Image (cartoon, helix red, strand yellow):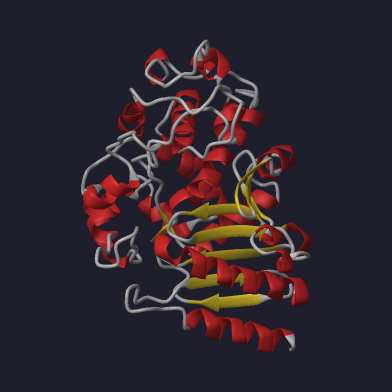
């Protein structure tokens, strides 16, 4: 099958991936020198979920390039004690001294995840509670307080454990080092330089402006098909709550292009963030700010497919870059319950990129 026929077939496949439970088609954008695939409204704002970790890591990389920190810098040199003293710590661990920036970036800090607490632990900002009370306001500080009283996972550096807690601490490091709110730093150092036009409207939006923006937000569901959350959650998507924010497929493409061109931080930091270190599950491996997809880890028959780097969100949102093909893949499947469908589509796109990219 030729390149255009294969691309058209992939578009038809994506446009058919809807269901009664989630009656909205995914958005998909593939952009490279030999392939261009577009389906859905690529300028519509949507909640990218943990895709924001790549942006957070990039802001940390910029501070590294400025000489403010290194991967080995202890967090006690960057944060006030009130951000650290309540953190769960293994025996003989001094969090201020023993947890480093790199531990936070690579999910090896030993801290539990306040958004996905270990069995037997409670958190008011867990996914289940966010779904139950989507209107409740949050900040990075209030979310971090949910870690108080939890058990540590391990000593720093001893074990990989995916943790939103670590990235909440990174947002606080950015604020302390830059002397401005996270949203302001994000706007001036990523959103505006990269040309993320849709995200620029949402970053730090006032209540009045948010009322104008929210109706355009793409629908999304966590786990309950009957509970569409976009309007109830919109107030937390201005990049000020600790829960990330809204952006568009075109905006995320602009960010990735700027990042991998070396326009946002040094290539040394990009390499550091993207180098895979720990496997989360299947073919999903994490570095220090980015994930790598090794498709053969999901199914041996997929051996030989190219390995993209980027970000993955719990709402089946993908933002990945294929370095060998200089090609970007941006997907939004709108719900955690559509994660398998999103990976099925991404595998199809990886085959397309391998064959024709």
Residue 216 position (above or below residue 66): below
In the rendered image, residue 117, in percent from the top left (x then y), is placed at 38, 37
Image coordinates of residue 19 in percent, x first then y, are 37, 78
Q: From where the camera sits, is residue 249 visible?
A: yes
Determine the residue positioned at 47% across, 41% down: 186
Give the number of callouts: 0
Residue situated in front as seen by the camera: 72 or 261: 72
Classify the position of the N terminus by image quarter: bottom right
Q: Is residue 117 above or below residue 335?
A: above
Comparing 291 with 32, the one in front is: 291
* Residue drawn where x is 60% and y is 65% of the image: 329
| Whether residue 134 is visible | no
Q: Judge by depth and name the residue closer to the eye, 175 or 209.
A: 175
Give the quadrant of the C terminus.
bottom right
**Left or right: 322, with 20 as reference point:** right
Residue visible at 57% across and 23% down? 156
Q: Is residue 100 above or below residue 211?
A: above
Residue drawn at the location 46% of the way across and 33% of the way down: 171
């Amino acid at each position: 099958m030729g390149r255009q026929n294969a691309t058209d077939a992939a578009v038809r496949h994506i446009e058919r991936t809807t269901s009664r439970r989630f009656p909205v088609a995914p958005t998909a954008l593939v952009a490279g020198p030999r392939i261009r695939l577009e389906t859905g409204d690529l300028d519509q704002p949507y909640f990218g979920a943990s895709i924001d970790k790549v942006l957070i890591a990039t802001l940390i990389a910029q501070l590294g390039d400025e000489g403010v920190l290194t991967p080995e810098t202890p967090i006690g040199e960057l944060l006030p004690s009130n951000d650290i003293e309540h953190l769960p710590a293994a025996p003989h661990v001094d969090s201020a001294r023993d947890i480093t920036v790199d531990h936070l970036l690579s999910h090896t800090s030993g801290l539990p995840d306040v958004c996905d607490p270990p069995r037997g632990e409670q958190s008011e900002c867990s996914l289940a509670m966010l779904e139950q009370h989507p209107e409740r306001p949050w900040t990075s500080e209030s979310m971090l307080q949910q870690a108080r009283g939890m058990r540590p996972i391990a000593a720093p550096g001893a074990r990989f454990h995916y943790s939103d807690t670590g990235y909440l601490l990174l947002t606080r490091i950015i604020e302390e080092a830059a002397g401005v709110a996270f949203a302001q730093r994000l706007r001036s150092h990523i959103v505006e330089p990269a040309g993320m036009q849709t995200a620029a409207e949402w970053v730090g939006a006032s209540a009045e402006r948010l009322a104008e923006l929210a109706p355009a937000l793409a629908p999304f569901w966590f786990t309950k098909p009957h509970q569409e959350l976009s309007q109830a959650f919109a107030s937390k998507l201005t990049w000020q709550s600790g829960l990330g924010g809204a952006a568009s497929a075109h905006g995320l493409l602009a960010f990735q292009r700027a990042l991998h061109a070396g326009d946002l931080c040094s290539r040394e930091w990009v390499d550091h963030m993207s180098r895979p270190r720990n496997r989360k599950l299947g073919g999903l491996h994490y570095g220090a700010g980015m994930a790598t997809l090794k498709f053969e880890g999901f199914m041996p028959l997929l051996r030989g497919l190219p390995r993209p780097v980027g970000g993955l969100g719990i709402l089946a949102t993908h933002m990945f870059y294929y370095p060998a093909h200089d090609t970007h893949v941006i997907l939004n499947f709108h719900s955690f319950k559509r994660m398998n469908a999103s990976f099925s589509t991404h595998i199809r796109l990886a085959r397309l990129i391998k064959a024709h990219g």
